[in-house]
Image (tube, rainbow, N blue to C red):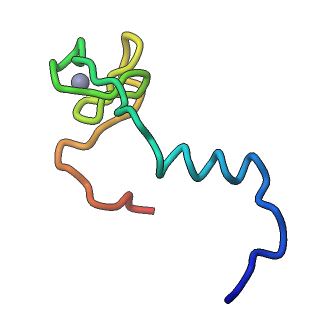
């Protein structure tokens, strides 16, 4: 059976655990501009509002992948 050649660094271990072994969900708040549920400390995904202004322009139609 294959055995790891080297010890995994603390950073590698912690980076994996940060995503896979998360114990708490991100905080959800209400957008002060449009009232939608949004993740705290992130721009609103429905209107792009953050910190009192439109930080991220959001297209009227939901876009699957950014066009170039
Ligand atoms: Zn919003």
Is residue 1 or residue 9 the one in the foreground?
Answer: 1
Q: Is residue 40 above or below residue 60?
A: above
The image quarter containing residue 37 is: top left
Asked if residue 36 lies left or right of residue 68, the reply is left
The image quarter containing residue 34 is: top left
Q: Is residue 10 above or below residue 68?
A: above
Is residue 29 or residue 12 the one in the foreground?
Answer: 12
Q: Quadrant of ligand 1?
A: top left
Task: Name the residue furthest front.
Answer: 1
Instruction: Locate the N terminus by quadrant.
Output: bottom right
User: Where is residue 13 drawn, in percent x and y?
Assistant: 67, 51
Is residue 35 or residue 60 the one in the foreground?
Answer: 35
The image quarter containing residue 23 is: top left
Residue at 76%, 75% (x, y): give it.
Answer: 4
Task: Name the residue furthest bottom.
Answer: 1
User: Where is residue 17 drawn, in percent x and y?
Assistant: 56, 48
Asked if residue 5 lies left or right of residue 44, the reply is right
Residue at 65%, 45% (x, y): give it.
Answer: 14
Q: Is residue 28 above or below residue 2?
A: above
Residue at 83%, 75% (x, y): give it.
Answer: 5
User: Where is residue 68 drawn, in percent x and y?
Assistant: 45, 62
User: Where is residue 54 drawn, in percent x and y?
Assistant: 36, 22
Asked if residue 40 lies left or right of residue 18, the reply is left
Residue at 44%, 41% (x, y): give it.
Answer: 22
Tally of numbered tags: 0
């Amino acid at each position: 059976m294959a055995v790891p050649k080297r010890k995994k660094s603390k950073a590698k271990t912690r980076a994996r655990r940060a995503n896979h072994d998360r114990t708490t969900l991100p905080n959800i708040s209400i957008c002060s501009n449009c009232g939608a549920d949004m993740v705290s400390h992130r721009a609103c995904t429905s209107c792009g509002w953050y910190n009192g202004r439109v930080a991220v322009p959001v297209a009227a139609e939901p876009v699957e992948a950014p066009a170039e």
